[in-house]
Image: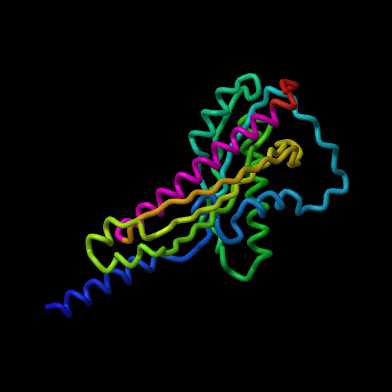
Amino acid sequence: MKMKRFIKMMLFFAVAFTLAGCYSTGLSLREKGSFNYSNFIYGLYNRNDSKAEAIKKVKTPIKLAVAQVGENTPPDIMVKMLEKEGYLVSEVMALPAGGNDIDYYNNERKSGSQEIENRMDKMRRLAKDLGTDYIFLFGGSSDIGTSSNWLGFFDITIVGAFVIPSQKITAEGRAAGALVEVESGKVVLTVNSEDSKTAYASSANLSGQHDAVLISMRNDLVDRLSKELIKKLSFYSGDI
């Protein structure tokens, strides 16, 4: 009986510790591989435009379309925050920027680049049909890791595995956004934000706490990015 109990405990901890380690994702879980914020922005500049016009200065209030790379709609927290700034943004519309039709990890990078470039062209045309002046496109990256501390010694007991905070969760994230002029496809300003989170969890509760930390950090990144955008738009309006 003791041997069976020992084997069951070892299997339990084997499952728990498979969650340990480190991995990276985009700001959205669907922002991955070649389908990322950087490629979307540089996709605007793939064509060699010898007749490029000078970028016009932003004149507030603007009609704004908002899109998050990897998502069919941007976070509601960002949309509502921008809607409150009526003197800067007269209208906010959500645009889809998700897409699972790209083979993210293939070796045909040229094909993937062309697909993203086409996506940006379509996004601009949609934004123009909706009557917006600019698109705010954003994305980012998230890194999260888990490590055991000395309290892991107590995980040899069932009670300890469920109660003792033997696992340290560390997350770091960066978000970036660009205000794109719909008519020209030029980037007129960029903003960015950073955040980090640390939390402790028991081995048995590691998975749930792990996801909670990641969600909290992403929400804070979006909140900070929204405030940075409002700050820069306020600068253009002459309010700061």
Q: Is residue 57 above or below residue 73?
A: above
Name the one closer to the observer, 122 or 186: 186
**Quadrant (top left, top right, bottom left, bottom right) of the C terminus:** top right
Nearer to the camera, 60 or 184? 60
Q: Is residue 232 magenta?
A: yes
Relative image position of residue 173 (x, y in whole percent): 56, 50
Q: Quick one: which residue is furthest to the bottom in this view?
A: 3
Residue 129 screen position, x and y as percent: 63, 33
Between residue 92 and residue 85, name the one nearer to us.
85
Q: Main secondary structure of the magenta part?
A: helix
Instruction: Report the magenta residues as a range.
Output: 204-233
Q: Residue at x 85, y 39 (%)?
A: 53
Compared with 151, 107 (above or below) is: below
Of the 4 image quadrants, the one containing the N terminus is bottom left
Q: Is residue 46 left or right of residue 230?
A: right
At a point 69% along the width and 29% down the height, the residue shown is 233
Number of disc labels: 0
- Residue 191 located left or right of residue 56: left
- Using residue 107 as the reference point, say whether residue 58 is left or right of it: right
For this orientation, the residue located farthest to the right is: 50
Is 14 situated above or below 221?
below
Which is nearer the eye, 147 or 233? 147
Q: Horizontal and vertical percent for residue 189?
A: 73, 38
Which quadrant of the figure has residue 19? bottom left
Q: Is residue 157 magenta?
A: no
Residue 41 in the image: above or below residue 105: above
Find the residue positioned furthest to the left. 1
Residue 17 position within the rendered picture, expressed as x and y whole percent measured from the top left: 37, 68
**Left or right: residue 109 compared with residue 169:** right
